[in-house]
Amino acid sequence: MRGFLTAVTAAATLFSVAAVADEVAVPLGDADKGAKVFRKCSSCHQVGPDAKDRVGPALNGIFGAAAGAAEGFKYSKALRRAAADGLIWDYEHLDAYVENPKALVTGTRMNFRGIKDEQDRHDVLAYLRRFSDDPSNIPEAEPTAQHVEVELPPEILAIVGDRDYGEYLASECLTCHQSGGTDDGIPAITHWPEEDFVIAMHAYKRKLRPHPVMQMMASRLSDEEIAALAAYFKDLE
């Protein structure tokens, strides 16, 4: 009898191990489909060989990384608190954050409603995993580049904004946007790279972005004024 029970226990153990192995072997998502889903993220995040921090940090090597660990990137106070509490970007927490950023990290500056479709999340995380397996050897396939909403002449992007003038102009912006970078239903605009800010404002100016109030505000601004605002909000604490 004891031998029978031992055999049954061994068989059950092997079955469990096999089941776990099968579960691990099954991919959680389709990385190629995830590359397309990632376009929703690419106005703020970059990934790939030449990825840089933009409105959000570059996402190479994100799997298993500690939250708030990108050197030189200015995270929100909320994300820094989560990092101090030990948040690690494992699959479970990445999935929750992509589904609803503000539910996982209350007060985050990440102005994204989230990806509600479970399979889309699995796909985009499978895509990002490609850039985390070995960050020193990132695939050379064409990365999902940052989506540029409007192509601007180099001379506009080269304008050096006057930060003091930007502070003067910003009073109207700060009637809605929070200077501390918090999001009270209105997107935060602090710590944006200047080029991203300029592109976004010109997208409103050309009515490529749909918000009517922002379209009106942007239409009143000259190229120099937009550059000044970009310089001010970039380093606003």
Image (cartoon, rainbow, N blue to C red):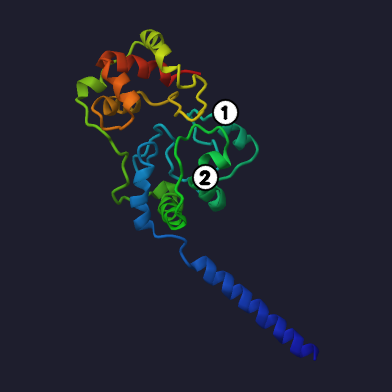
Task: Tell which of 137 and 93 is nearer to you.
Answer: 93
Q: Sequence-wise, which precedes: disc 2 or disc 1?
A: 1
Quadrant holding the N terminus = bottom right
User: How many discs appear?
Assistant: 2
Query: Which residue appears at 51% of the width and 41% of the height?
Result: 101
Secondary element at image label 2 = helix
Foreground residue among 209 and 157: 209
Residue neighbourhood size for the residue with mark 1, other residues' Cα within 10 Å, grouped as few (<14), some (14–19), many (≥20) = some
Name the outermost residue toward the bottom: 1
Q: Is residue 4 above or below residue 145?
A: below
Residue in the picture at 34% in, 28% down: 196
- Image coordinates of residue 8 in percent, x first then y, are 71, 85
Relative to 85, 197 lies left or right: left
Residue at 58% across / 32% down in the picture?
A: 78
In the displayed structure image, the side of residue 52 where residue 7 appears, left or right: right
Amino acid type at image mark 2: Tyr
Measure how far apart labels 2 and 1 are at the Cα level. 16 Å
Q: Is residue 45 above or below residue 192?
A: below
Disc on res. 97: 2
* Secondary-structure class at tag 1: helix
What residue would you read off at disc 1?
Answer: 77
Q: Do the residues bearing badges 2 and 1 touch, measured as CB atoms within 8 Å?
A: no
Residue drawn at 41 percent across, 21 percent down: 234
The answer to whether residue 229 shows anywhere in this view is yes
Name the kind of residue labelled 1 in the image: Lys
Q: Which mark is residue 209?
A: none
Query: At which x and y percent is residue 227?
Result: 31, 17
